[in-house]
Image (cartoon, grey):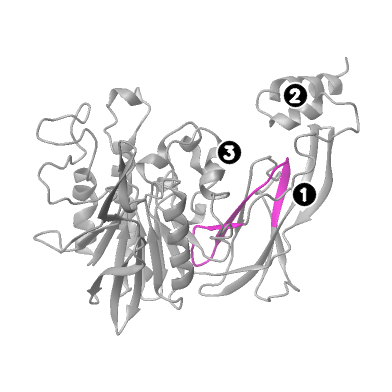
Amino acid sequence: MDRRDFFKNSAVLALGAALPSHVIAQAGTEPGNTAVSTEKDLPLISSAPVLQNYAENSMGIAFSVSHLANGFVTFSEKPDLSDGKTVMCGGYRVMDVNDKVMLIRLTGLKPATKYYYQIGAHKIHYRHYHDMKVLGTEKDPNIYSFTTAGKKAAAHFCVINDTHCRWEPFARSLDKIAELAPSCVVWNGDASNVEETVEDQKRVFLNPEIERKDYAANMPYLFVPGNHDDRGWANRHLERVWMFRQPEERSSRDWDLGRNFAIRMGDIAMIGLDTAEDKVDENPRFVGLNNSAEYRKAQVAWLKDALKRPDIKSAPYLVAFCHIPLFDPNPKANPGDIHPADKDPRYTHDYAIWQRTCANLWGPLLAQAGCQVVITAHQHHYRYDKPEGQRTWAHIVGGGPSMGYKTVNGQRVENPDLFATVIEGKIENNQLVINVHNIATGKIHATHTFKKR
């Protein structure tokens, strides 16, 4: 065996366990026969695009594929894309090729600017390094659009949370968002339940079981993870379907803080923080494989720097988002810092109802910066806490995936206090107005107003 054959055959053996299943199938076919019977009739592009990580100068775009592929996005300020620039999936050296999800980053964009774009993908045959080729190219016929963030962007956001693959409230929430037409949406955690495979993750974000398949094709999203978004084999690397923030948006010190964001949108500065798990790291069920405590501490330095940024500091309104609440008025609500296994007779539950550690780490910084409101989730029940004492910011908890009832022993029990929410924030009459939309009734449940800081 000569050197080239040696490396060729060794590579096939070494990569066999890691390659996508249909690539392994191809390796066993006759030369030139690259079709895979279970996939040959499927469209290559198998979802609408999802706009991720709303920002001033960049945009993430993800979509699903059914076969080994390399994806691309063509974008322009012109609706006909006549001067469009094409960006491939992957960075320098080699392009990304996989059979699950295409993640493309558009960079160097102008703030508060509308762009048009179209997605496409090259279908790839890959047997080994010396046997790869493009089998064909597919484009989504639709031309989509988005508008970047920035000081001149419309100051208008919506928040959803705790969707948990409950498709009816999720679909109804997206219909409300389409009606309200905000500049961006904050998905405030627990999109997942427990996702073990990338296909499971695709079902959550790219191919949800709803009619509005293009829910994020023209509406940019910001994602704040919840505790469930860390659970399951696949969710340990959620960035396979929902990419981290752009590298230039964080320093080398903050390299692992790919979910935090500090965004200026008109008169509103938006801060995203990650409360991580709702159980302590020492809890035996994690067998020592969680490191949430250090993660929360690492966000302190990031937050200090973010709040000092001129674009954030100068914004008249500062709104923070995180999944687990930073306050609870109930003395029996577990504060999430009970070692070693979250259990204590003083508290009703053996998991964090709220996050006292995060409140102590981040709360004073937000108060010092003049944050008007912190919007959270996790408890599946809407609540408003007015500022009190040293907690100078208001606190809003979004509702859960319910439609005015719950199921007990297989029976439907009406409970009008349980309802999914779309929390809408916008600038009106020189104030920040936050409307809490009750998705079960279709009405505004509550309105809160905030003055400039």
The crowding category of the residue bearing disc 2, from other C-alpha atoms within 10 Å (few below 14, some 14 to 19, many at least 20), is few
The crowding category of the residue bearing disc 3, from other C-alpha atoms within 10 Å (few below 14, some 14 to 19, many at least 20), is some
Quarter of the picture holding the C terminus: bottom left
Question: Earlier along the polypeptide chain: callout 1 or callout 3?
Answer: 1
Q: Quadrant of residue 118?
A: bottom right
Mark 1 residue type: His
Q: Residue at x 30, y 85 (%)?
A: 429
Label 1 residue SS: strand
Residue behind mark 3: 199
Residue 399 badge: none
Residue 122 badge: 1
Q: Is residue 276 left or right of residue 363?
A: right
Residue 181 seen anywhere in this rendered image of the structure: no
- Disc 2 to disc 1, C-alpha distance: 23 Å
Disc 1 to disc 3: CB gap under 8 Å: no
Mark 3 residue type: Glu
Residue behind mark 2: 11
Quarter of the picture holding the N terminus: top right
